[in-house]
Amino acid sequence: MPGDGTVRYYQENGKAKALDLETSEDEKRRTRGRSLRKKAMTASTKLTHSLKRRSSRRVADCRYAAISVNDVRDAKEEAAVNAFRQALVTKDLLPPRHDDYHTLLRFLKARKFDLHKTILMWSEMLYWRKENGVDSISQDFVYEEFEEVQRHYPHGYHGVDKGGRPVYIERIGKIEPHKLMSVTTVDRFLKYHVQGFEKAFSEKFPACSIAAKRHIDSTITILDAHGLNWMSFGKVAHDLVMRMQKIDGDNYPETLHQMYIVNAGSGFKLLWNTAKTFLDPRTTAKINVCASSSVLSFY
């Protein structure tokens, strides 16, 4: 179908001619990306002013309140969010930057709407942010080794899915753990990982919300396992992944919409069938293990 960036071949007088659409499509994506980023930053500025005028009796509609988006709420969820917010206000645990309906709802969902457990999770998140300087990490931290890291750990965002959510891709089969650790450190990589989340919330999610005209704060993740060798993956890489998952689960809950593990061999599937028995059913329901990438019709 036209405009999907692939190379098509047409037969004319018995000769094959290639029509390469990549250059024009790449330019369109870059132009669209620059436009969305500009709109997102404008919306962010408007949001800052709107928060100064926010009511103390109602939770902000969404983190991007200055953006015109469809925001359909469940009555029971809204009541739970209001109760959670009031409890945080009473305990002085609600900084203005986190006074957001969808942020509060994500934490409630992560603790299955148990108010006591959610308040504990929230307070631990605030402590973690303070201890690690997360509020200013987007400005303060410079990941100078980014290009070298990409060579040994290919990853990044690429487009959106049919619902407008950003698509994040990791080629885990291409990870070279020892080479990765020769150009960076675990602590610096984790800071880079956190910075990526902060930028997603300040830039990428607002831009996607503008484009989709609805609130978006979750991603589609694709892990390409082609070429993955568990023997070479190593303990360092395993520990790094575990620490990243803990950071995500504790401080950025419910931001994964769906995960697709593609090009998974029989060894991976066997391992997954064992591992998923130890995971929360809500999490495993979001993870799809596929033998090839041909099933990704959502993208």
Image (cartoon, rainbow, N blue to C red):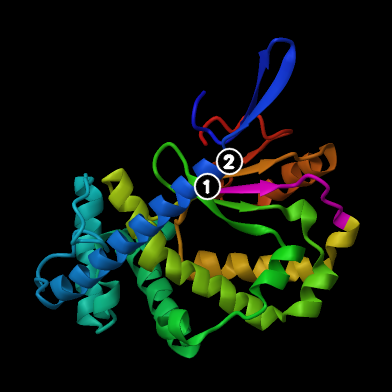
Query: Residue 183 in magenta?
Result: no
Q: Nearer the viewer, residue 118 or 175?
A: 175
Q: Is residue 134 visible?
A: no
Q: Amino acid at mark 2?
A: Glu
Residue hosting label 1: 26
Residue 160 on image: x %, y %: 46, 45
Q: Secondary structure at mark 1?
A: helix
Q: Is residue 202 above or below residue 96?
A: above
| Residue visible at 51% across and 42% down in the picture | 24
Query: Residue 224 in magenta?
Result: yes
| Residue visible at 38% across and 64% down in the picture | 203
The dot on residue 77 is none
Determine crowd level at label 1: few under 14, some 14-19, many 20+ residues with C-alpha closer than 10 A.
few
| Residue visible at 51% across and 69% down in the picture | 196
Q: Residue furthest front?
A: 13
Q: Quick check: marks 2 and 1 in contact, CB under 8 Å?
A: yes
Does residue 188 appear to the left or right of 151 in the view shown?
left
The dot on residue 22 is 2
Q: Is residue 241 visible?
A: yes
Span colored in magenta: 221-230
Determine crowd level at label 2: few under 14, some 14-19, many 20+ residues with C-alpha closer than 10 A.
some
Q: Amino acid at mark 1?
A: Asp
* Alpha carbon distance from label 2 to label 1: 6 Å
Q: In which quarter of the view is residue 70 placed? A: top left
Q: In which quarter of the view is residue 267 placed? A: top right
